[in-house]
Image: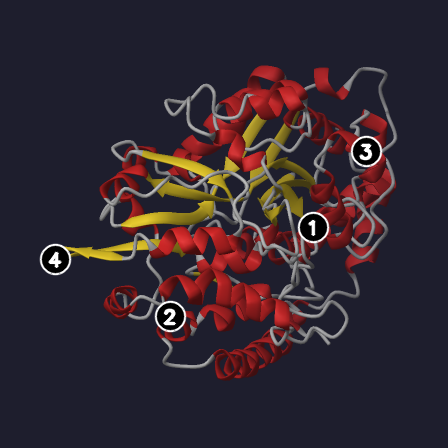
Amino acid sequence: MKTISGSAVQEAKRRIAPIRPESTSFFHRSGGVVLQKRKLTVTLSLALALALTASACGKSGTTANENAGETPKDTTKKSAANEPAELTFFTMGGESQDSFNDRYGNAIRKQFPNYTIKYIRSEKGTTLPELIASGTKIDIYYDSIGNFSDGLLGYQMQYDMSDLIKKTGIDLAKFEPTLIDAMRDISGGKMYGLPVYNTNLILFYNKAVFDKFGVAYPKDGMTWDETLELAKKLNRKDGDKQYLGLSVSPTHMLRMNQFSLPYVDSKTSKPVLDSEKWRKLYQTTMIDPAQDQGYKDRITELKNALPYRDALLKDQTLGMFVFLSAMPFTVAEEITPLNWDMVSLPTFKELPGVGSQAYPTYFSITSMAGNKDAAIEVMKFLTSAEYQTDLSKKGTMPVLKDEAIIKAFGQDTKFKGKNFQAAFYNKFAPISYKSIYDVTVEKSYVKQIGLMAKGEIDINTAFRTAIEEAEKGIADVKARSGAK
């Protein structure tokens, strides 16, 4: 590590002189809700750390307000992979220490024995705004695409990894293309992150419900119309138990929709719910399945919410449920007693062979990272065929378009023999534009789905109300963040 000279300190002071502490403000996450922050002015402690790094290391340590795409200069002939380094990881997702170690930490330590790998869990006292306020350095930030902008960009920690990717020989052509396209879109043509794992939507089904009523199981390649016809045969009451044919996860269905519809317009930041494609999505996937009176009664019992995962796993009264392909591995104990399987997500006739959007998790080297060469070596490892194969075998959807890696999906799990290839049956829909307003807007978009499904409010009225609420939410975010 370089010694910071007196001149470097003076340069650092010069860099942070314009920053006023009284203008510093933060946003926070509470109960899954993110208060966005644009044009965030970082605290003096963070600014000093970034400025000192920039002075000592040259342009490789640029802050968020500078072009951070230049490659750090090599100061040694030795490979960064063989040199001692300390790297700190963070995600706003609140992943446990054990989970981090099982999924990434232990593998990274084994691959790089000279690296000290630390993970800070997001909890009280170590939330992102608290870490930034205390000047804590984060080298690698990771999060799902739905929260990526809120964290990395909201706190201006982004760093263009393009030169490092090229220098290290990471071949972006080997990745599922929609994942790279989405990151370039988020980054304005740059590369603020690399995908490490992925997920999508598929259709899970309970064989016992189908067997009970003598109905044929669903198959890969079905359309929504075919699936709805199948679902009608399962909307039955047997004794005092009401069985239901089909339900979906509303939030995932909207954010990963097959039409690649964004929540807001990329140029105007206005809600774009009022379109025929949005109407078709709501009608087909969330309203039409609920036309049976017994189904509507269940929605009422659930306080105007659609039947969810418990209806499939615990009550075992739901025949089919659309959810993330990773579900069996996140609720392994609950799903084990169930006689279940999975098929590809039903498709719309006008979009043959098109499934849901991907929902990747990106890893990013931050602008404050002290050893970017070491960090990119870790990124190269996490996206290698070796590591991706291991992930795939354990049931995590890989990000590489390698057939051998894809075929390994789920094969080292206790669910081997299930139709895991259903997750790859359809091609991915292009990932829609993601904004800092999505979390707020989504709340408005899902709020009245239950009432629409029961027929207590028509879709046009519900959409008008949702748009009005979304506009207010966007205005609130802009007021808090100073965005225009």
- Amino acid bearing label 1: Pro
Q: CA distance from mark 2 to mark 3?
A: 48 Å
Between circles 4 and 1, the one closer to the viewer is 4
- Residue 164 is marked as 3
Where residue 350 appears, as percent x and y from the top left, is: 66, 56
Q: Quadrant of residue 308?
A: bottom left
Question: Which residue type does callout 2 highlight?
Answer: Gly
Name the residue at 30% across, 52% down: 234
First along the sequence among labels 2 and 1: 1
Of the numbered discs 2 and 4, the one sitting upstream in the chain is 4
Query: In this picture, is 40 found above or below 464?
Result: above
At which x and y percent is residue 306?
35, 62
| Precedes in sequence: disc 1 or disc 3 | 3
| Quadrant housing residue 215 | top left
Res. 193 in view: no
> Residue tagged by mark 2?
450
What is the number of the mark on residue 240? 4
Q: Which quadrant of the rendered structure holds the C terminus? A: bottom right
